[in-house]
Image: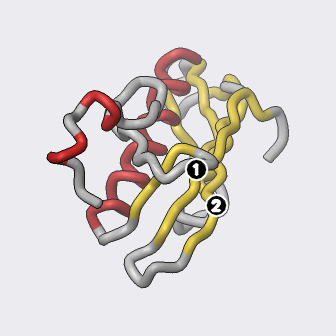
């Protein structure tokens, strides 16, 4: 992908126990003329190796909407992977990420009494 505006990676384990790294890349929003003749924006999104397509597009009526939809597409792919039995961890840790967090930060498990944590 060219013109990457955001990139991160997560440590993952699939439902069979195989560990791998997932890389998320979001491209710079680029204007294009829609079928109606208006100027819309599109961002490339890659969540590799989890997404089916090497890159997907996220389109919006402006650049902020395109970026927001690119992040939401990332969230949906990660959420589907977890629902299928996978696990997604903050890079370099065994702490799950909070998929619903705006920043994909680690779950604040350190705030839970250790007797209630799953080992």
Task: Give whichever of 5, 115 is nearer the camera.
Answer: 115
Q: Which of the 4 image quadrants contains residue 49?
A: bottom right
Residue 10 shows which numbered tag?
Answer: 1
Task: Give whichever of 5, 109 is nearer the camera.
Answer: 109
Q: CA distance from mark 2 to mark 1?
A: 6 Å
In-image side of 91 versus 69 (left or right) = right
Q: Please rate how many residues cluster around mark 1, counting C-alpha atoms within 10 Å: few if below 14, some from 14 to 19, many from 20.
A: many
- Mark 2 / mark 1, whichever is N-terminal: 1
Q: Please rate how many residues cluster around mark 2, counting C-alpha atoms within 10 Å: few if below 14, some from 14 to 19, many from 20.
A: some
- Secondary structure at badge 2 equals strand
Q: Position of residue 75 (x, y in %)?
A: 41, 43
| Disc 2 target residue | 21
- Secondary structure at badge 1 equals strand
Looking at the rendered image, the quarter that the C terminus falls into is bottom left
Task: Give whichever of 107, 7 is nearer the camera.
Answer: 107
Q: Are marks 2 and 1 in contact (CB under 8 Å)?
A: yes
Q: Is residue 100 above or below residue 80?
A: above
Residue at 54 percent across and 19 percent down: it is 38
Q: Is residue 3 above or below residue 91?
A: above
Residue at 42 percent across and 54 percent down: it is 77
């Amino acid at each position: 992908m060219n013109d990457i505006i955001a990139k991160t990676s997560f440590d993952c384990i699939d439902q069979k126990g195989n560990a791998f790294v997932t890389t998320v890349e979001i491209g710079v929003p680029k204007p294009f003329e829609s079928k109606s003749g208006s100027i819309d924006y599109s961002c490339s999104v890659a969540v590799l190796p989890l997404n089916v397509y090497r890159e997907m597009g996220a389109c919006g009526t402006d650049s902020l909407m395109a970026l927001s939809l690119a992040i939401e597409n990332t969230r949906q792919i990660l959420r589907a992977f977890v629902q299928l039995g996978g696990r997604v961890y903050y890079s370099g840790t065994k702490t799950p990420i909070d998929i619903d967090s705006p920043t994909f930060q680690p779950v604040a498990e350190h705030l839970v009494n250790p007797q209630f944590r799953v080992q």
